Amino acid sequence: MEGGVEGAYAYPGTPSSEIMEKLIELSGKYRFYVEWSTNEKVALENAIGSSWGGKRVAVIMKHVGLNVASDPLMSLAYTGIKGGFVLVVADDPFSHSSQNEQDSRIYAKFAQIPCLDPSSPEEANRMASYSFELSEGLNIPVMLRSTTRISHTRSSVEIKMERKKNFSGKFEKNSSQWVVIPAHTRRLRVKLSKKQKHIKEALEKLPYNKLEESNSRFGIITSGVSYLYAKEAVASLGIEASFLKIGAYPPSENMINKFLEKLNRVLIIEELTPFVEEFVRVYTKKQDLHIWGKLTGDVPETGEFSPDTVKEVLSKIFRRPFEEKSILPDLDKLLPPRPPVLCAGCPHRATFYAISQVFGKKAIYPSDIGCYTLGLQMGGVDTCLCMGASITISSGLYKSGEKREIVCTIGDSTFLHTGIPGLINAVYNNSRIVVVILDNETTAMTGYQPHPGTGITAQGEKTHKVSFEKIVRACGVSYVETIDPYNLTESIKVFKRVKEESGVRVVIAKRVCALLAKKLDMKRVRFEVTEECIGCQKCLKFGCPAIEWNGEKAQINEQCSGCGVCAQICPVNSIRKKNNEV
Amino acid sequence: MKFDLIIAGVGGQGIIFTTNVIGRACIKEGKKILAAETHGMAQRGGSVETHIRIGTEFGPLIPKKKADALLGFEPIEALRYSHFLSRKGIAIINTEKIIPPSCVFPGKFTYPDVNYLMSKIKEVFGKVIILNALKLARESGSIMTVNMVMLGVLTNYLPLEKKTIIQAIKELVPEKLIEANLRAFEKGVNFYLTYKS
C-alpha cells in the first residue's frame, strides 16, 4: 500500500493468503484493483499485463504457487516491466501447512531477479514499499520472499500512508521488448546478463544488509528471521560475534569479503537451503577461514529454526553444555496427539463415507490439496502430491494397468486451479476413473476465499458463476451426477450407479462448507442420541467430533452442526432432531 | 518491561483472538509486540500455540524455558507446551478438557487424569493457577468467552493496564457480544483476586 500498489493479484495459500485479504479490505478506500485469480500462473500473467499497461502491481502466492507461475516469471525477467512489479512469495520452512519445503530465493537466482528477505514484519513493511521503486529503477520484477514466522507474526508496525497516486499509463507497442521470439529473446538475454551488475550495485547500498563488527574473530552471516534468532542465542550464551545480516540477494561479493577480512571463523545461519553459504564459499579467497554451515552438517539442513536451534549450534561450536532435557519427560508420553480433523458437519466427511460404503477398502483413492486431504483419517486419501494432481494421477494409475476402481477427490477451487486440463486429458485418452468434485462453495482451507464457482469477486461483488457441470460436460464427460452429501442414502445410491458405468464419470458433491454456513449464520438444527442407542459405535466410526462415547452409549456435543448424516448411519434410528429446535 | 507469554489450546477456543486483544492493548500503550501463531489447520480442532513477546528486540519465537507465563486453555495442551515456561514463570490452566479424536476409541490413547496432570505441573513450576474457565464463562452468559476469563486471570501479570485491555476488548469484539465478554473478563480478574487471598 505504501509503495503505491495499483493492482494486486493472488491465489490463496497458507501462509500468504492474509496479504491479499488485507489488500481487499483497503482496496475500496484507496481505490486500487484486487483479484483472486484462478491460479498463480494466471495471477502472475494478469499482473504482467497490468504492469505493461503502466500500473504498479503486486502478485502474491505461497512457495509452491511459484512452481505453477514459474513459466511466465522466467521470461518476464527478460522482457522487464513497466509499472513496478513485486512478487511476494511466502516460504514455509517445516511445511507447517504445505506439501514441501522450498527456498524461493533459488527461483530469484534462477530468474536472475533481485530478492528481498525480511527479518521481521517491520522490515517486511519497509521492503514492500521500497520494492516498487527498486523494480522500476532496474526495470525488473522484484521478489519479496517471506517465511512462515514473518508471514504469521503479528507485530506493531509504523506505517506512513502517503499514497502516491496515479502511475497509470497505457500499453505502448514495442515488439522487440514484449514479444519473446528467438531473435528478440537472444538480445534480451544479453541485456538481462548485463543488468546483473546494476542489480548488485543497487542492492549493496540497501540498509537491509547490515554489518555489525565486534572485536572477535568469530562472525555470523545470517538472513531472514534467523538473524534475530542468532542475536538472541549469542546474547543468551554471552558470546562475542560480528554479524553480517543479508537482506537482499544476490549478496554483494565486496560486502562479504570485507566482513570476512578480520575473521578466521564464520558460522552461516539460514533456513531452507545453503543459499548464502554457497555464495560465501564461492566469494571468499581466504584459505585459513573455517566455515560452519549446512554444507558441513553443523547447521540443520531441514525444518524451521528457533532461537534454540542456533543456541544448540553455537553450544557445540563453543563446547558449552546444551540442556535438551524435557521439563516433564515422563508426561510427554502421556499426552494424546491432537491433529486437525474434518469439522463437525463437514460435507466432505459425508462424501468420503458414502464413497467408502460403495467402493470399499479395495478401491484406490487419489486426492488433492485442501481440507479434504484430512479424509486421510477416514481411509479416503491414498495419494496427495500437488494442486490438481488427483485426476492426473488417477488416469496415470489406470494406464499403468491398475484394474481396481479408482475414485479421486478434488475440491471446487482446486478443480478450477489446475484440475480441468487433467480431466480433459483423462477423457481424451480414454481413462476409466471416477472423479468426485467436492464443491463446498468456497476455498475453505485457506479461509473461505471466493472463486469463480461462487459467483462472487474478491471485493464481494456478484459476477458470473461458472457451472461445474457445464465445464465437466464440455471436457467430454458424458456421465455427470450431482449429489447433496448430507443426503447419505441418496448419495450411496448415486455412487452405486456410477460404479456400474465406465469411462470418466464425474460426481459433483455440492454442499456449503459447515464452518462457512456457521459464519453466515445459516439456520441449523441440532441432533441428539435417544435412549434407544444400542451402543454399536457405527456413528462413532463416522469420526465426527460432535459425537462422543460416554462408555455405554453415543452422545452428541455442542459442536453438532445439524447435518443429520449420523442419523442416517444409525441402524436403530436412535439419533433424532432435538425437539425444541426443530 | 519485557514479557514472554505462551498461549496453548485447541483450534476454535479463541486463542488468536486473545492474542489480538493483547496486541491491540500493547499498541495502545506504545509497547512493542510480536506474536507468532501456528494456524492454517487451526480451526479444524487441532492443537494451537501462540508466542507473544512484549518489548523484545529479538524474533517472535520464545526460547525453551524462557516464557514468563503460560496460558493453557486446555489441560493436555497446556502440558504439551509447558517446556517453554520458565521455572519461575506463572502457569494459568483451564481444567475443562476437550477430548481429542485420538481418544474417542478406547485402546489407542486415553485422556490422562486431569488432577494427576495438575499435580505434576505443580511439582515443576512454582506458580500455578488452576480454574474451570468454562464454568465461569457459562456464568457470565456465554460458553464462547473462556478466552476472556483466561485473559482476565492473566491481566494481573501482564505489563499492561487493565483499562487498556478492556478498551481493546471493546474495540475488537462485535458490539452485541461486548457485555458478555467483559463480564467473563471481570470474572477472570476477580477469580485471581479471591484465589490469592
Image (cartoon, coloured by chain):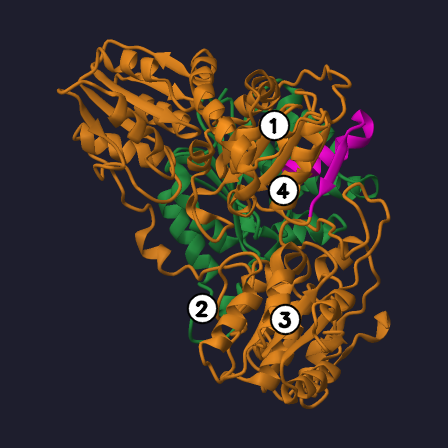
Assign a secondary structure to mark 2: loop
Numbered disc in front, either 3 or 2: 3
- Badge 4 is on which residue? A17
Q: Nearer the viewer, residue B192 or B40?
A: B40
Query: Spatial distance from mark 3 to mark 2, Cα to Cα?
Result: 24 Å
- Labelled disc at residue A349: 3
Query: Mark 1 touching mark 3, by CB under 8 A?
Result: no
Name the N-terminal-most of marks 1 and 4.
4
Q: Is residue A171 visible?
A: yes
Task: Read off the chain for label 3.
Answer: A
Please tell me which of labels 1 and 3 falls first in the chain: 1
Q: How many labels does the image show?
A: 4
Image height check: is A549 above or below A183?
Answer: below
> Viewer-nearest of labels 4 and 2?
4
The residue mark sitting in front, 1 or 4, is 1
Give residue A100's position: percent from left, percent from top: 44, 50
- Same chain for mark 4 and mark 3? The answer is yes
The question of residue A26 being in magenta is answered with yes
Q: Residue at the spot x=36%, y=47% of the render?
A: B123
> What numbered label is drawn on residue B95?
none
A86 relative position to A309: left or right: right
From the viewer's perspective, tell me whether residue A213 is left or right of residue B131.
left
User: Which structural element holds mark 1?
Assistant: helix
Which segment is the magenta one? A17-37
In the image, are marks 2 and 1 on the same chain? Answer: no
Q: Which residue is the extreme one toward the front?
A: A183
Please tell me how crowded label 3 is: few (under 14), some (14-19), or many (20+) other residues with Cα within 10 Å. Answer: many
Point out the frontmost of discs 1 and 3. 1
Foreground tag (2 vs 1): 1
Label disc, if present, on residue B110 of the rendered structure: 2
